[in-house]
Amino acid sequence: MRNETIFQKQSMLGLPVLAPAMLLRRLCAGLRTRATEETAIASSGGRRVLVAGLGNYGMGSTRHSIGMAVLQQLAHRLNVADQWKADKRCQADMAVATLGHVQLVLLKPRRLMNINGRSVASAAEKFGLGPEDIYLLHDELDKPLGKVSLKLGGSARGHNGVRSCIECLHSDVMVRLRVGIGRPQGKMSVERHVLEAFSSTEREVLPRVLEQGAELVLGHIQRRIQSEKSEGLSSGETEHRGTPTS
């Protein structure tokens, strides 16, 4: 009787009527395909790097989530902007791209900024990555909009998303792309400033800023892989102004 009811509903909705055995086979096939894809990603050989865009999920137009906007631009550059998939284990949206022989795991946490680190740490565990294999893209109050720089490790400097990542990964060596958003003007609080959308004037320069950020990250990964066998990377910060530099 129950199967008959299912068939009747399928027919009323204009859906193809499938026998229980066929429904079960299709369900199992879908589960096998997904499991195969996840296994291939998690176990593939070669170099792998995790790039996480920090922010408040669902608030992508705000200043605080500009790291996610840069990540989206990076996904466009790598032709995977339409390949985001929700990952329940990491509670994040994820896309996987290749850069030469390097696999890039792009991550957008589905969490609030101050607990982004939980998603980043879960992804690091899933893919067997250490803190040195992780890039964090985030907003920076102490830089004006239009200034983008890489920082090789270091403290959170008051950024709650970075602090969460440091606490969850038990390390501060992650490479950080710091995207300037500037400090609030007048009496506006910092909290209101970062949670507001960019002004119309600011939006005019955003495309250039996002492209600069994506270019800087890609260039650093490429140079880092090329020199991986040499002695480490120098600490400090590379300031980026205008045209991306090598």
Image: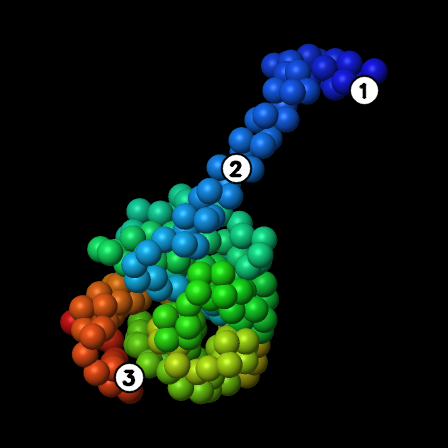
Which mark sits nearer the N-terminus, 1 or 3? 1
Marked residue nearer the N-terminal end (3 or 2): 2
Q: Most extreme residue toward the right, as rendered?
A: 1
Residue pointed to by mark 3: 237
- Kindly identify which residue carries mark 1: 2
How many numbered tags mark residues here?
Answer: 3
Disc 2 crowd rating (10 Å Cα; few below 14, some 14-19, many 20+) is few
> Looking at this view, is 104 or 191 the one in front?
104
In x, y percent, where is residue 160?
Answer: 54, 78
Amino acid type, callout 1: Arg
Image-quadrant location for residue 66: bottom left
Is the residue under label 3 in contact with that under label 1 (CB below 8 Å)? no
- Residue at 50% from the left image edge and 41% from the top image edge: 34
Mark-to-mark CA distance, 3 and 2: 45 Å
Tell me the residue that label 2 is attached to.
32
Q: Is residue 173 left or right of residue 159?
A: left
> Which numbered disc, 2 or 1, marks the residue closer to the eye?
2
